[in-house]
Image: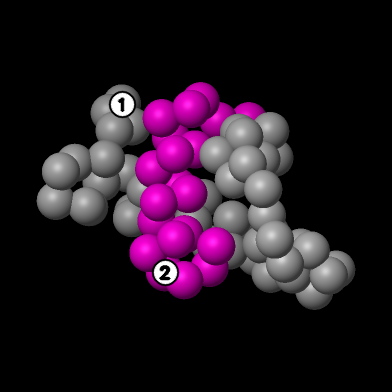
Amino acid sequence: MNTETSSSGSGIGAADPLLPQACAWIARLHAAGEHVLPYPVSRLQHRFRLGYSRAWALAEALERRGEW
């Protein structure tokens, strides 16, 4: 399974099935008053048990959507 993001910006991050879950998780963090999220890739890795490449692609997708 290729987890890298392509140079065009579309890749596993944009179509990742975890994207809705990650958006909901970030919404819960914001609702709890945590508006600054340091170390986003590490937090995604820990929360969703992901490797670095997939967590990075997911973080990029979240940023493009304005969630992060």
Q: Toward which corner of the image does residue 15 lie, by quadrant?
A: bottom left
Question: Residue sitting at 45 percent across and 47 percent down?
Answer: 58
- CA gap, disc 2 to disc 1? 24 Å
Q: Is residue 54 visible?
A: yes
Q: Toward which corner of the image does residue 61 lie, by quadrant?
A: bottom left
Quarter of the picture holding the N terminus:
top left
Image location (x, y in percent) of residue 9:
22, 52
Q: Nearer the viewer, residue 12 or 31?
A: 31
Question: Residue sitting at 53 percent across and 68 percent down?
Answer: 67
Other-residue count near label 2 (Cα within 10 Å), few / some / many at <14 / 14–19 / ≥20 = few
Look at the numbered disc 2 and give the secondary structure of its residue.
Answer: helix
Q: Which mark is residue 1?
A: 1
Image location (x, y in percent) of residue 64:
37, 64
The dominant secondary structure in magenta is helix
Q: Nearer the viewer, residue 16 or 61?
A: 61
**Residue 50 sits above or below residue 19 on the image:** above
Whether residue 48 sits left or right of residue 61 in the image: it is right
**Residue 28 sits above or below residue 39 on the image:** below
Region rendered in magenta = 48-68
Amino acid marked by disc 2 = Arg
View extreme (right): residue: 32
Look at the numbered disc 1 and give the secondary structure of its residue.
Answer: loop
Image location (x, y in percent) of residue 34:
79, 63
View extreme (left): residue: 8
Which badge, 2 or 1, comes first in the chain's sequence? 1
Image location (x, y in percent) of residue 17:
45, 51
Question: Residue sitting at 55 percent across and 62 percent down?
Answer: 68
Amino acid marked by disc 1 = Met
Whether residue 27 sits left or right of residue 17 in the image: it is right
Is 59 one of the magenta-colored residues? yes
Q: Which residue is mark 2?
A: 65
Whether residue 67 sits left or right of residue 61 in the image: it is right
